Image (cartoon, rainbow, N blue to C red):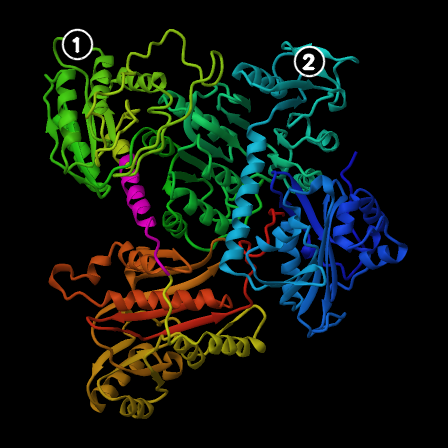
Amino acid sequence: MQAPQEKTQDPAYPAHWEADVVLRDGGTARIRPIAADDAERLVSFYEQVSDESKYYRFFAPYPRLSAKDVHRFTHHDYVDRVGLAATVGGEFIATVRFDRINAQGRPASAPADEAEVAFLVQDAHQGRGVASALLEHIAEVARERGIRRFAAEVLPANNKMIKVFRDAGYQQKRSFEDGSVHLTLDLEPTAESLAVQRAREQRAEARSVQRLLSPGSVAVIGTGRAPGGVGRTVLRNLLGAGFTGRVYAVNRAFPEGGSEVDGIRGVRSLGDISEQVDLAVVAVPAERVPEVVAECGEHGVQGLVVLSAGYAESGAAGRERQRELLRQVRSYGMRLIGPNAFGVINTAPGTRLNASLAPDPPQRGRIGLFTQSGAIGIAVLSGLHRRGAGLSTFISSGNRADVSGNDILQYWYEDADTDVVLLYLESIGNPRKFTRLARRTAAVKPVVAVKGARHSGSTPPGHAVPVTRVPDTAVSALLRQAGVIRVDTVTELVDAGVLLAGQPLPAGPRVAILGNSESLGLLTYDACLTEGLRPHPPVDLTTAATPEDFRDALARALADEFCDAVVVTAIPWVGEPDYPDEALATALQQATATAPAKPVAVVHVELGGLAEALASAASTGRRGAAAGRRPAMPGAQPQRGAGAAGSAGGLGAEPPGVSSHLNPPPPPEGLGKGRGGEENPAHPHRIPAYPAAERAVRALAEAVRYGQWRRQAAEQGKVPEYDDIDQAGAAADIERLLGDADPRGTTLAAADAEALLGRYGIPVRRALPAPHPDAAVDAAARLGYPVALKTTAPHLRHRPDLGGVRLDLADEEQLRRAYAELTQVLGKPEELLPVVQAMAPRGVDTVVRAAIDPAVGAVLSFGLAGAASELLGDTGHRLVPATDRDAAELVRSIRTAPLLFGWRGSAPVDTAALEELLLRVSRLVDDHPEVVAVSLEPVVVAQHGLSVLGASLRLAPPPPRSDLGPRRLPSY
């Protein structure tokens, strides 16, 4: 059985208006234009609408549509008359239409820019946000067709429809005329309408993920009759986790009347189940999946986890099979994890879902984990388990045909059970949206990501993603701009995750080091310096130190107001007595229990028992304490956790036979206070242990940098306004220059580039051509001495090391001599294309660039001119539009930045002017997406002011933006 088909043969049919959207309740619907062959669907839809809703639509009793009505509502020119429908299962659930009108309210054609709009939503689907989604899409269609305003007549009693218009965020006018409310909406997007749209998107997508992670019932389709196999393994894991809902085993090979599998009911099909099934885990061969999807859709299943392989990862035929799978799933309003997925886990006590192939179920904790690889998922789960860190939720998306990391970030953003987000990504389908969501999430909880397939051409075959042209270092910089902690390996992912989940954020980079090995302390000290931290001299407790010595030294370090974090180093005991590792773990926990909230990490050598004891202390402590909190911001009131361990045998159960002696009673009055004196409920901390100093310090350094970013993120920068920017004039210039240009784009002539930059207050120092010596002398006379003579041939441009530049030419004699030398050594004038330019004040040569990348959007880049940026790659990057804070950080982000600030006694240059230049370039690219590349090189930054000596601009039709416009799910 196949999904309903909704295709039309009308050549005028605007297929690009089709979109899948997530509704308020987490279900999906398809929005598409209404076509002439939709007559039966429209009549069927109308018959299911209540008389009251019909009255609200037509202002009179209207029990049925006439043939004339049906023809009118299904035949459109898609210019002046447009209709859209929201469909589920191929059937209409809502419609919207507009008719262009003139100032008198009568039918009209362009250039009339107003249209009358009307909605009708089936009663069974009211309250799902269908009308709001339709309004977003019909408004986008109207803008495309030159319509700028909507007019609507609504009965005063139709409060739901009035609310849809009122809450949309558009500028509007309302009046009461002839017994109805007359509404006029200005369709120009506003900051409020964009905020409303994104808030609705967040709620809808978060709800859709919540339905997948918190189902009331699960059916495992493809459960084997004999032990073993994928389906049977998932069934066993579901039961072993203590899932709180209903579980069904489905296999068409079961006997008539059903059977019993692992103590639960086994049936041949979903039709044999009388109750609602919320989630289906599909473990059947790929060729059987379509009939399973159809059965699930007709049974009202809300979401699928498809474990089956044989899709896009297997080649072209598999890619087409995956496209068809996604179309079929969405046609029924369902969401999909997979295909080729590993499964999902939710450790919440009220759910205890383990619908995955994970061999060792994780304990309950505060970490959310998303991976695009089952193998990596197993590795991370195992690493977290060994370190005593538990999970809130786990999702392995496989080929991520539908549900992606963006959807999961929407859910984790407001999930009270998740304090730290860990991501393993092999591709990012919508990078702009990912950056936006990651920035918002990182402002309230850490987001740690490791990116696989980082190099060009290595995108996993199962993923459809835009190809980026920026280097991986730029991607890393952009992620850090969004607050994402990017690490390089899965080991570093776990290292950072356990520290952030169990320790508060450091207030700064000052690190105390103490331990019973001077050498290990020095290694730790060196590692801190390498990571940019400010370590105190190591405190050597000597090899004779007792656990009590460790406890007292740690307590003193934590109490030191000049210390932000502590690294404890430990080697095996020397001599007698030989203290058990558990004794040291207890001593460290006791020290943190009464001290200010600062992060502590342990570096151990050949003390595996210490790591196990610390992990055990964490796993047996109060869930509402160490594991049940968010990492506190320095000086902020820590939040109490609300989680509790699950019942015995569930995912949150404590290991049998392990006591909770490391869970002390609340500290006495006056103890356990944070830096500002506030109560710290997070004791005992889960102290992470590392087998190498470099690993511990790297994780701590990431926490320091994240804490700094988060404090800065609390004070958002702004995109400044400049009175001298001529945005309208620049737009007119761009339209003129693109008019007769190659549709693939054009590089502007120097004069045109300088004129366009001038519209944005970016002057370029004038350079005059010098095709022969006399022309050079004339140019110098016009510009005034001293001058520079330089070649502009492509192979010599920006290569002063090749001798193509002569500076400080004070008179005609020097200029003629320099001209003769250039042409004698480097070639003929027609090959060198020499120019004469007035000398700029001495300073530091820099380069400013901006470019549109198809994957990550507009990127602003900065570096020093020459070898620093070209050979060593010392270039900083920020996303456009850049704020004043972004510009200041960008200037300081490169390794050679000290040259701008008075390195070795040199005079500091005017970085304020440099930051302003960066902001103006950012504004130009952001205001005019047709400007796809800007290069200013060199930009000489002097003590006072700067000079742009060379400029290149490229224009092209603007690339499509996946982060603008109405909400829609990605497709490929």
Q: Secondary structure at mark 2?
A: strand
Q: Secondary structure at mark 1?
A: loop
Separation of marks 1 and 2 at Cα, in angstroms: 56 Å
The residue indicated by pointer 2 is 265
Badge nearest the viewer, 1 or 2: 2
The residue indicated by pointer 1 is 578
- How dense is the environment of label 1, judged by Cα within 10 Å: few (below 14), some, or many (20 and up)? few
Q: Nearer the viewer, residue 736 or 442?
A: 442
Position of residue 810 relative to residue 358, above or below, is below
Residue at 36% from the left image edge and 56% from the top image edge:
877
Task: Residue 830 in the image: state x and y as whole percent.
Answer: 40, 83
Task: Residue 942 in the image: state x and y as whole percent.
Answer: 22, 71
**Which span of residues is magenta-colored?**
699-718
Quadrant for the N terminus in the image: top right
Q: Nearer the viewer, residue 406 or 486?
A: 406
Q: Nearer the viewer, residue 594 or 265?
A: 594
Task: Residue 169 in the image: state x and y as whole percent.
Answer: 55, 56
Task: Residue 178 in the image: state x and y as whole percent.
Answer: 72, 63
The kind of residue on which mark 2 rests is Arg
The magenta stretch spans residue 715? yes
478 lies left or right of 891: right
**Residue lying farthest to the front in this orientation:** 179
Main SS, magenta region, reads: helix
Residue at 33% from the left image edge and 20% from the top image edge:
618
